Image: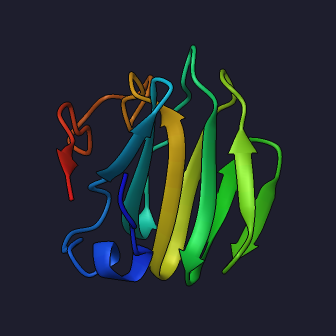
């Protein structure tokens, strides 16, 4: 039980699309990630995901619409829904999702982070 400062933790994140775990509770991970550019289209068969914008902004693309998110905004992507985060400028996001969640979900590929580090 200790204080977690998001700005301090974000300063430790040096790469894009590389989530880092900052806390764990009830089988869930709280993660920080910096994003830039387009991610892969994917879905998660069994996991919902919460995205909270800490710094910057991005758009969450779905096959039928796009949701623009700015600092302080959040979105929950329900399991099974195909989506793709896109950031024109660097954006810092807090993720809350089951510990079993693989970042690229159904897509796999080069951006998959099979084992996440803690910061």
Tell me the quarter of the picture where residue 52 sits. Answer: bottom right
- Residue at 33 percent across and 75 percent down: it is 10
Q: Residue at x 39, y 35 (%)?
A: 104
| Residue 43 locus on image (x, y percent) | 56, 28
Residue at (56%, 49%) from the top-left corner? 84
Q: Residue at x 40, y 27 (%)?
A: 99
Query: Quick one: which residue is furthest to the top in this view?
Result: 46
**In screen coordinates, is 84 left or right of 28?**
right
Compared to residue 108, the image places residue 62 above or below, namely below
Q: Coloured how?
A: rainbow
Horizontal arrangement in the rendering, residue 13 relative to residue 78 (left or right): left
Q: Position of residue 19 (x, y in %)?
A: 32, 53
| 39 in relation to 96, above or below | below
Query: In the rendered view, does 11 fall on the left or right side of 98?
Result: left
| Number of numbered labels in the structure image | 0
Q: Quadrant of the C terminus?
A: bottom left
Q: x, y (%) of residue 68?
A: 75, 70
Q: Residue furthest right?
A: 65
- Whether 54 is drawn above or below 99: the answer is below
Task: Tell me where residue 55 appears, x and y as whole percent.
Answer: 53, 82
Q: Quadrant of residue 34?
A: bottom left
Taking depth in this image into account, of 9 and 87 the one nearest to the observer is: 9
Examine the rendered structure and indicate whether residue 80 appears above or below residue 19: above
Q: Is residue 63 left or right of residue 95?
A: right
| Front-lying residue, 46 or 23 | 23
């Amino acid at each position: 039980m200790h204080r977690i400062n998001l700005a301090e933790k974000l300063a430790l994140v040096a790469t894009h699309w590389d989530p880092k775990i900052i806390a764990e509770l009830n089988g869930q991970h709280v993660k920080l990630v910096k994003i830039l550019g387009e991610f892969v289209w994917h879905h998660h068969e069994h996991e919902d995901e919460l995205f909270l914008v800490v710094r910057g902004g991005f758009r969450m693309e779905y096959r039928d619409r796009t949701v623009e998110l700015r600092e302080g905004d959040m979105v929950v992507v329900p399991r099974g829904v195909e989506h793709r985060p896109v950031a024109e400028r660097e954006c810092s996001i807090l993720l809350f999702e089951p510990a079993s969640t693989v970042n690229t979900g159904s897509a796999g590929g080069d951006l998959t982070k099979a084992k996440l580090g803690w910061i």
